[in-house]
Image (tube, rainbow, N blue to C red):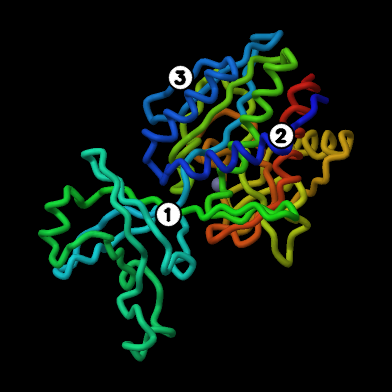
Amino acid sequence: MPYVDEQEVVHLFEDLVNVPSVVAYYPQIHAWMEKTLNEYGYSVFYDNKRTLYAKLEGKDHSKTVCFGAHLDTIGLIVRQVDPNGWIQVKNLGGVNFHSIEGENVYIHTRQGKTYTGMVIHQSHSVHVFDDAKDASRDVSTMRILLDEEVHSDQDVYDLGIEHGDLVSIEPRCIITRSGYIKSRHIDDKACVASLLEAMKCLKENQIIPEYDTLFAFPIYEEIGHGGAYVPSEVDTYIALDIGLIGPDYHGTEKSVCIGGADAYSPYDWELTTRLYTLAKTYSIPACIDIYYRFGSDGTAAIRAGQNVKAAVFGMGCMNSHSYERTHVSSLVEVSRLVLAYLMNEK
Ligand SMILES: [Zn+2]
């Protein structure tokens, strides 16, 4: 098993998480990924729905194994502008509006400009509004306060901001001395970092997997269809995505969480068993859990009728879809399980 450098994975994560890639917004993250993967010695290509791929030839070309980690993060999309210049939004993916009140956001316009703002509630101040504490936080009550001199809807439109502009949320990434990563978008940038580190290790150590291996990076997972298209040669689709933590779960921030089933379907029995067995063989702390309100690109593929065996695993993530937390050690372990799988294919 090649050595996986913890510092490198963490730096990859910090870089990745600071490149905005809200659902459907790919220009910046694709540029970053192309540059990084080219440095590692991979060429990249895309399908029509903007999933980025890189390929590693195996010894046997009779089938293709695909590892996927989604580039997109939950975020917002501009819905309309109020007469006073506040921006109404719709969520992209499972945003918990309570967790983004007061957070900084970036509005990406179709002219290529980015404006900053912050998320507020209509009753934004406890000093002014009786219902500031108790009013519901949802699409109907939350707004974006633009950091520009705007006093009307027309002022906002005049800046080039339009309905349908995509809005990414500040990650606020902090790595503590004790090794905890606190950040938004650990889902799924931590898995992307782990997969990139494994891809780097494969090249550096000249590891040739048994079968042709495809690495897929979709941009629509958070709304459910990132992995809906899978190239026809793919036999096995292993999605890397966060694991859940809660009363019914064995998962922790320091473990690799393997999904036994999610809200849609159980994952492939033999494939999931193999991942769990490999984790034990390589002393990777791992568990299998049943995910409640969760889907992955693995089940997105199955749901869309793709003829693949699917599995999912990733680092345990506290506070998911909010300001999240995990531990650096689990990023390393996720990379190691990817490598263990590819070095032990039968
Ligand atoms: Zn995810």
Displayed quadrant of residue 256 = top right
Q: Amino acid at mark 2?
A: Ser
Q: Is mark 1 within 8 Å of ligand 1?
A: no
Displayed quadrant of residue 206 = top right
Task: Report the Cα–Cα distance between label 1 and label 3.
Answer: 27 Å
In front: mark 1 or mark 3?
1
Q: Residue 333: which numbered mark, if any?
A: none
- The residue wearing badge 3 is 45
- The residue wearing badge 2 is 335
Residue 97 appears in the rendering: yes
Q: Residue at x 59, y 21 (%)?
A: 214
Query: In the rendering, at what x and y percent does residue 57 appear?
Result: 63, 11
Asked which secondary structure carries label 1, the reply is strand
- The residue wearing badge 1 is 169
Q: Amino acid at mark 3?
A: Phe
Query: In the rendering, at what x and y percent does residue 311 appear?
Result: 66, 38
Sequence-first tag of 1 and 3: 3
Query: In the rendering, at what x and y percent does residue 341 appear?
Result: 76, 28
Query: In the rendering, at what x and y percent does residue 283 appear?
Result: 88, 39
Q: Residues within 10 Å of mark 3 (few under 14, many from 20)?
A: few
Q: Residues within 10 Å of mark 1 (few under 14, many from 20)?
A: many
Asked which secondary structure carries label 3, the reply is strand
Q: Residues within 10 Å of mark 2 (few under 14, many from 20)?
A: many
Q: Residue at x 51, y 32 (%)?
A: 217
| Quarter occupied by the C terminus | top right
In the image, residue 44 sits, relative to residue 112, either above or below, namely above
Sequence-first tag of 2 and 3: 3
